[in-house]
Amino acid sequence: KVDVVFGLHISSELEVGKVLYKPGAFMAAADWFSIKVKGKGSHGSQPWRGVDPIQISAQIIDGLQSIVSRQMELTKAPVVITVGMINGGVRQNIISESCIMQGTIRTLDSEMQKIVHEKIKQTATMIAAASGATADVMIETKTLVTYNTPELVKQMVPTIERTLGASNVGETNWVTGAEDFSYYGTKAPSFFFSLGGMPKGNDASKAAPHHTPDFYVDNSGMPAGIKTFCALVFDYMRAAKK
């Protein structure tokens, strides 16, 4: 039986030696989606003889952003919908038969996640239907919301402050990045936090984000993570024996 789970993620935008955390919902759930718009092909010089799936896809992309800005209660929790890939057409003068787009959804509330899924399906299918096309929508959950058990966070933050110094430990806002660590939180109380990897003195606003070509972290930040993990385990186990 696992009593608790601790985890961390290195951050290229947080200075070496620092830790940031958030009780409750910390990192977003991530869903993958695919929308295939099926129209009717024709010659580009006679668009009225076809149904243009690329033009319809452009309307759908715009409509997806209206879900975020006009249909979600953003004072409750943030929502992100990003189309990262679109592919349609074979020649510059032909209206294609179909167009496909794929993207990611980020939510920090499970009820809002369900609503977003419904809204995406509704938006895509109805915009397509309005122009005589169809839209096949697929949505797949990749990770859950990374949730930090508030009681565990309250218990263990003093350990991190003692290890790294209170001035190096702070509470942060929601993070719209996602973590498969979130599945551990469904099995036991959990505490996941960010560890600094940005060289001291660097400007965080100019640090290359994760998963980009210029991503960089300073290895001198690793000892802080090791010390923190060890301290968390020892302090928790000592408290559990009392």
Image (spheres, helix red, strand yellow):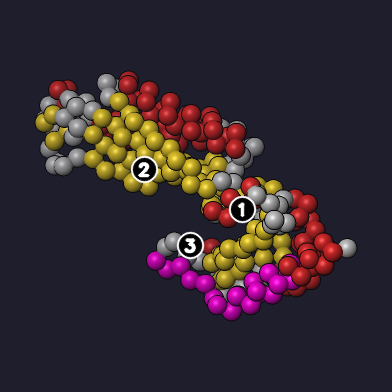
Q: Quadrant of residue 226?
A: bottom right
Q: Nearer the viewer, mark 1 or mark 3?
A: 1
- Please provide the residue range marked out in magenta: 213-232
Q: Return the mark for residue 102.
A: 2
Q: Position of residue 150 (x, y in %)?
A: 75, 50
Say which mark, if any, is on residue 155.
none
Q: Amino acid at mark 1?
A: Tyr
Quadrant in the picture for residue 19: bottom right
Q: Is the residue under label 3 in contact with that under label 2 (CB below 8 Å)?
A: no
- Secondary structure beneath disc 1? helix
Asked if the magenta segment contains residue 228, the reply would be yes
Quick one: which residue is furthest to the right in this view? 242
Tell me which amino acid carries mark 2.
Gln
Residue at position x 26%, y 43% from top?
87
Q: What is the total number of numbered labels drawn onto the structure image?
A: 3
Identity of the residue drawn at 48% across and 29% down: 118
Is residue 217 a member of the stretch shown in magenta?
A: yes
Residue appearing at x 55%, y 42% in the figure:
107
